[in-house]
Image (tube, rainbow, N blue to C red):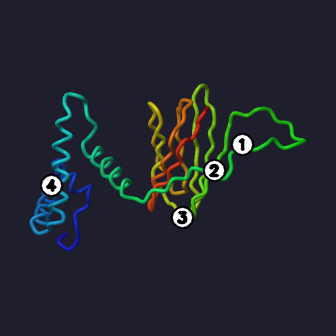
């Protein structure tokens, strides 16, 4: 254990007294000789203490909160790129002549941000909407976040680049795709408007 740093999960378990006695002893021996892990442990203990002072509201498990905070901090450090022009929007394309078609509420939009292409489909469900998307390119996983007035939805981006955000009221939103290398931002996305 002395040749490598302790994992974030192990430090959280240590801070919350969830380690077996032998694992705790090994972790504490490592902490005694590693200033990097000592510093990380102090940050985790400080955050954990702050979270426990939130009052009488029931709180989720502290380690879940800590992981979410660190994921948010990691996302904030990635380069950001705003993509405000769609490569294709089915709402703006004319109907094909000679085909029978009625008005459709479903919408498909393509955005391009080299080396990525983002395929979005906005589908009605009763009075709310679902946003299904796929990031095509060298991405593997991440998180999709949709923010708007009185609206916040988040979903994981799968290893195939797919995500789904559900139960969205009609609104103008901002879609953020936090990928491994950068965060792509699509402002003024109209859902159901």
**Residue depicted at 24% across the width and 43% down the height:** 62
**Residue depicted at 63% across the width and 50% down the height:** 86
The circle drawn on residue 92 is 1
Structural crowding at the residue carrying mark 2, measured as other residues with C-alpha within 10 Å and reported as few (<14), some (14–19) or many (≥20): few
Q: Quadrant of residue 32?
A: bottom left
Kindly identify which residue carries mark 4. 42
Residue 126 appears left or right of 151: right
Residue contact between numbered discs 4 and 3, judged by CB atoms under 8 Å: no
**Residue depicted at 59% across the width and 37% down the height:** 190
Q: Earlier in the sequence, mark 1 or mark 4?
A: 4
Q: Earlier in the sequence, mark 3 or mark 1?
A: 1
Q: Position of residue 103 (x, y in %)?
A: 76, 32
Q: Earlier in the sequence, mark 3 or mark 2?
A: 2
Q: Name the mark nearer the viewer: 3 or 2.
A: 2
Residue contact between numbered discs 2 and 1, judged by CB atoms under 8 Å: yes
Kindly identify which residue carries mark 2. 86
Number of numbered labels in the structure image: 4
Q: Position of residue 175 (x, y in %)?
A: 51, 45
């Amino acid at each position: 254990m002395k040749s490598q740093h302790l994992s974030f999960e192990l430090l959280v378990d240590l801070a919350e007294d969830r380690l077996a006695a032998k694992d705790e002893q090994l972790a504490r021996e490592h902490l005694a000789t590693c200033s990097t892990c000592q510093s990380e442990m102090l940050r985790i203990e400080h955050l954990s203490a702050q979270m426990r002072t939130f009052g009488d509201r029931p709180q989720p498990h502290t380690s879940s909160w800590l992981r979410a905070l660190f994921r948010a901090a990691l996302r904030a450090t990635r380069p950001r790129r705003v993509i405000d022009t769609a490569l294709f929007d089915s709402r703006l394309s004319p109907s094909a002549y000679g085909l029978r078609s009625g008005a459709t509420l479903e919408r498909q939009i393509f955005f391009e941000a080299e080396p990525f292409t983002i395929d979005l489909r906005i589908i009605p469900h009763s009075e709310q909407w679902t946003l299904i998307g796929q990031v095509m390119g060298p991405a593997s996983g991440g998180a999709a976040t949709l923010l708007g007035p009185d609206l916040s939805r988040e979903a994981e981006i799968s290893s195939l680049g797919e995500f789904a955000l559900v139960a969205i009221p009609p609104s103008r939103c901002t879609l953020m795709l936090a990928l491994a290398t950068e965060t792509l931002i699509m402002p003024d996305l109209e859902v159901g408007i």
